[in-house]
Image (cartoon, rainbow, N blue to C red):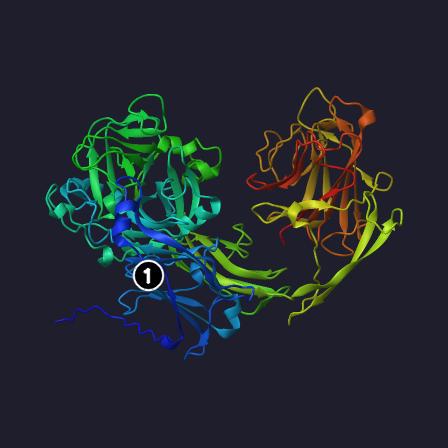
């Protein structure tokens, strides 16, 4: 006979109890708040928030906390927060960052609740972090970190949610409870819906300045079926009336309980059916998300969860249907009053209306006229509505339905949410159909068999030195594709199972690797790195010397001055080959990749006498001449970086732009702005819009310099390539109004300078900027705006590296 047993791992934590910092919060008036804060419809409120401003540890060596050395030789900080009568405590932080050696543990006094360790893999991109509800009137947080990394650990506790209602444990005294007419998903009525049932989760969230609420949401499938953890819920669950920063905080506070449901079918209408089930025994949880899109009109919110749910949860990703139809029936799966999962049925046709309309007029919602079995309640907000083909067609916005009435509910239509928004941030299609397959329906599916990914990062990284990152990947279907993000900007910095790179400036943040296998299944790993650099500070005040002007010791318009600045390295590191970049941050613009643009000094380089003349070649158009719709190809002596593309050939257009595609034709005479924008002509390749407009009659020159006549902002004695459109004027204009348009490229640093002179070169009908090959990212300095360009100021564009 074999002995069958479950191995038990006992974690014994020994924290320095003598070094605990105690922090008392206002007491909670439980009975009053139950009566005044809990509403029968919408998100279910269960907590109120307190603002905190005196518990923080920052990367700038500012701290309001006291660290102690523990028995393991690490630095340790423990905080106990408490509020008399509170039913739960939840702690929200900004500027949250754990360096490689740091850990965070969360627990109650007797450690019957213990979460952790949270490590650098949990560092959020936006810095917002919530610990999740700790039942009871207190919560303990313990941070540990190696002494040499203590100054890099960062957190700012700015909100604490104090619970007043244990919605998961007992009904509120005002009578709010999950109605007994509801149907448990364990009942036979749920048998045909098991995959969709598993996709649904109950979650809590915190709204800054208000408190904690409960809603429902569901995992939603995308056309690549790569198990990207998208979670669909309602916009009014924390996003519709919030600022952008508050929306980040709300999403970060999301705490989901999966498979919170009765294990037996309680008879609908019975006393037991209306009795809450304690959620404390349900431990399939996860926390943290990013809001990627929402639209208050159809009331959808789409979140990207911070982690893919564990395969042990046995969850599915719900399918959907985006047809413009009303459907002949509907079912919903939800958490009424925040309680265990239920299922409700409407057997009659749904109605297309506006929100809260009974008929006609609007097209944003589906109206469930009267539930035939079950209902919805406060806490059901955000739950899906499925048609008879098991496809999600909407999510709950609101209504009047309850046990004992025949009132209606309204669901924001998936059809409307799909593509009626004016940007990716207000519609679903960009996220749920990333390859633009244009599918109308998608079935529910389980999680794909994802690879296992672990990355290794080097220690003691310094600017200018080579750092090697590597990955250990197994499982999945093989044929792995790798995409590394080394500086947290969301853009790929390299590919392959290992990557060598050099940082040009200090960086404290996470390195992230995304691996996709041959079946399209993806997995992500992320680890913290600390890149150290010299600490350069300006010493004293600059000394000004006049180069030209009236010598009256005043800086007057039109004069040129030189400012001599003394800088000193006050740190303990040195670096070779470095340079300082001064810029006016108030005027600087950034794109998603990290490139920036700003005004800079002008020094026009006339190469019309000694540069190489490149005759225009007529593009694929008829009825015009080569100097109107033409192109010229230039082979560069030194390649440069355009976004993440290495470019050694450029094609100039008569219309004032350069293209990174070697077979470009130059015929895009109508400029697009703002950038990025998909061109309707000459559409392949990245763009450098020096002054993109409908231009003609220019003569084009190019010349390379080993030491550029105009000093770069990004280094001394750099080589450069100069491009000149000499004597260009607007189509239909007169030669007397001709302009000179110039671009200077410093290949070593991939910096661009755009200069313009002559009548009409003011940007009134032109685009000045850059965009990537896919036309998904770009910088716009000028966009059909008069006086946005001048002869006195050039435009500089700096590559992120």
Q: Can you give x and y, in whole percent of width and height, for residue 513 in the image?
A: 48, 56
Q: Can you give x and y, in whole percent of width and height, for residue 559 in the image?
A: 83, 46
Residue at horizontal 83 percent and vertical 49 percent from the top: 554
Question: Could one spot residue 391 in this view of the protein?
Answer: no
Residue at horizontal 43 percent and vertical 30 percent from the top: 420
Question: Which quarter of the figure is the N terminus placed in?
Answer: bottom left
Q: Front-most of 791 and 770?
A: 791
Which quadrant would residue 330 be assigned to in this image?
A: top left
Query: Which residue is tagged 1?
Result: 83
Q: In this view, does 403 lie above or below 467?
A: above
Question: Could one spot residue 264 in this view of the protein?
Answer: yes
Q: Can you give x and y, in whole percent of width and height, for residue 771 in the image?
A: 61, 40
Q: Is residue 640 left or right of residue 298?
A: right
Q: Front-most of 568 and 656?
A: 568
Residue at horizontal 81 percent and vertical 54 percent from the top: 562
Which quadrant would residue 392 be assigned to in this image?
A: top left
Q: Front-most of 412 and 715?
A: 412
Question: Which quarter of the figure is the C terminus placed in?
Answer: bottom right
Q: Can you give x and y, in whole percent of width and height, for residue 80 in the image?
A: 36, 67
Q: Is residue 750 left or right of residue 315?
A: right
Q: Element type at marker 1?
A: loop
Q: How crowded is mark 1: few (under 14 residues within 10 Å), some or many (20 or more)?
A: many
Q: In this view, does 439 lie above or below 264?
A: above
């Amino acid at each position: 006979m074999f002995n069958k047993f479950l191995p038990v791992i006992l974690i014994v934590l020994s924290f320095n109890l003598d070094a605990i910092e105690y922090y008392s919060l206002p007491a909670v008036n439980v009975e009053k708040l139950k009566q005044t804060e809990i509403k029968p419809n919408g998100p279910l409120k269960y907590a109120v928030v307190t603002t905190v401003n005196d518990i923080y540890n920052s990367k700038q060596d500012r701290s309001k906390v006291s660290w102690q050395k523990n028995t393991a030789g690490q630095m340790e900080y423990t905080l106990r927060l408490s509020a008399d009568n509170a039913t739960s405590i939840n702690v929200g932080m900004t500027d949250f960052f754990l360096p490689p050696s740091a850990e965070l543990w969360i627990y109650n006094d007797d450690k019957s609740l213990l979460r952790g360790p949270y490590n650098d893999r949990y560092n959020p991109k936006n810095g917002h972090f919530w610990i999740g509800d700790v039942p009871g009137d207190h919560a303990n947080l313990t941070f540990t970190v190696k002494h040499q990394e203590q100054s890099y650990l960062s957190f700012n506790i700015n909100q604490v949610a104090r619970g007043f209602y244990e919605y998961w444990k007992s009904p509120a005294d005002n009578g709010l409870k999950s109605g007994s007419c509801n149907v448990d998903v364990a009942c036979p009525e749920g048998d045909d819906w098991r995959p969709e049932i598993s996709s649904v989760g109950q979650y809590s969230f915190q709204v800054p300045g208000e408190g904690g609420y409960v809603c429902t949401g569901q995992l939603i499938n995308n056309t690549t079926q790569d198990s990207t953890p998208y979670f669909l819920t309602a916009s009014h669950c924390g996003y519709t009336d919030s600022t952008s920063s508050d929306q980040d905080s709300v999403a970060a506070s999301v705490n989901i309980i999966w498979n919170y449901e009765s294990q037996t079918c309680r008879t609908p209408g019975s006393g037991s059916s209306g009795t809450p089930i304690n959620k404390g025994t349900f431990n399939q949880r996860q926390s943290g998300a990013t809001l990627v899109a929402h639209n208050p009109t159809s009331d959808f919110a789409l979140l990207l969860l911070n982690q893919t749910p564990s395969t042990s949860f046995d969850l599915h990703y719900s399918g959907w249907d985006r047809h413009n139809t009303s459907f002949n029936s509907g079912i919903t799966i939800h958490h009424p009053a925040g309680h265990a999962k239920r299922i409700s049925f409407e057997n009659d046709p749904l109605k297309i209306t506006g929100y809260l309309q009974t008929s006609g007029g609007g097209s944003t919602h589906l109206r469930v006229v009267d539930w035939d079995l079950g209902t919805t309640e406060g806490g059901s907000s955000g739950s899906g509505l499925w048609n008879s083909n098991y496809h999600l067609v909407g999510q709950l916005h609101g209504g009047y339905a309850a046990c004992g009435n025949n009132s209606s509910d309204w669901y924001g239509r998936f059809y409307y949410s799909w593509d009626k928004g004016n940007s990716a941030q207000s519609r679903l299609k960009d996220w749920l159909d990333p390859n633009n397959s244009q599918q109308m329906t998608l079935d529910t599916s389980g999680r794909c068999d994802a690879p296992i990914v672990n990355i290794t990062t080097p220690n003691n990284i310094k600017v200018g030195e080579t750092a090697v990152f590597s990955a250990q990947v197994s499982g999945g279907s093989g044929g792995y594709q790798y995409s590394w993000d080394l500086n947290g900007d969301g853009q790929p910095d390299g590919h392959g199972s290992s990557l060598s790179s050099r940082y040009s400036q200090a960086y404290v943040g996470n390195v992230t690797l995304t691996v996709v296998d041959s079946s399209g299944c993806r997995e992500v790993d992320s680890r913290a790195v600390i890149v150290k650099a010299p600490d350069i500070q300006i010493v004293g005040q600059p000394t000004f010397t006049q180069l030209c002007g009236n010598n009256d010791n005043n800086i007057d318009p039109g004069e040129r001055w030189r400012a001599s600045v003394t800088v000193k390295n006050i740190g303990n590191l040195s670096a070779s080959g470095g340079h300082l970049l001064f810029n006016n941050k108030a005027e600087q613009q950034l794109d998603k990749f990290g490139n920036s643009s700003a005004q800079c000094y002008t020094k026009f380089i006339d190469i019309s006498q000694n540069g190489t003349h490149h005759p225009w070649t007529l593009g694929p158009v008829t009825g015009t001449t080569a100097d109107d719709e033409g192109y010229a190809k230039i082979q560069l002596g030194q390649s440069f970086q355009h976004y993440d593309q290495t470019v050694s050939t450029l094609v100039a257009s008569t219309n004032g732009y350069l293209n990174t595609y070697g077979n470009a034709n130059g015929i895009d005479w109508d400029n697009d702005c703002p950038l990025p924008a998909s061109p309707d002509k000459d559409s392949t390749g990245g763009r450098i819009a020096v002054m993109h407009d409908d231009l003609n009659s220019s003569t084009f020159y190019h010349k390379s310099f080993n030491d550029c006549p105009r000093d770069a902002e990004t280094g001394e004695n750099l080589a450069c390539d100069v491009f000149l459109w000499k004597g260009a004027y607007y189509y239909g204009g007169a030669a007397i109004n001709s302009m000179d348009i110039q671009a200077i490229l410093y290949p070593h640093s991939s910096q661009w300078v755009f200069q313009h002179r002559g009548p009409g070169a003011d940007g009134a009908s032109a685009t000045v900027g850059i965009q990537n090959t896919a036309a998904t990212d770009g910088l716009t300095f000028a966009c059909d705006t008069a006086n946005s360009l001048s002869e006195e100021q050039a435009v500089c564009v700096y590559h992120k590296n």
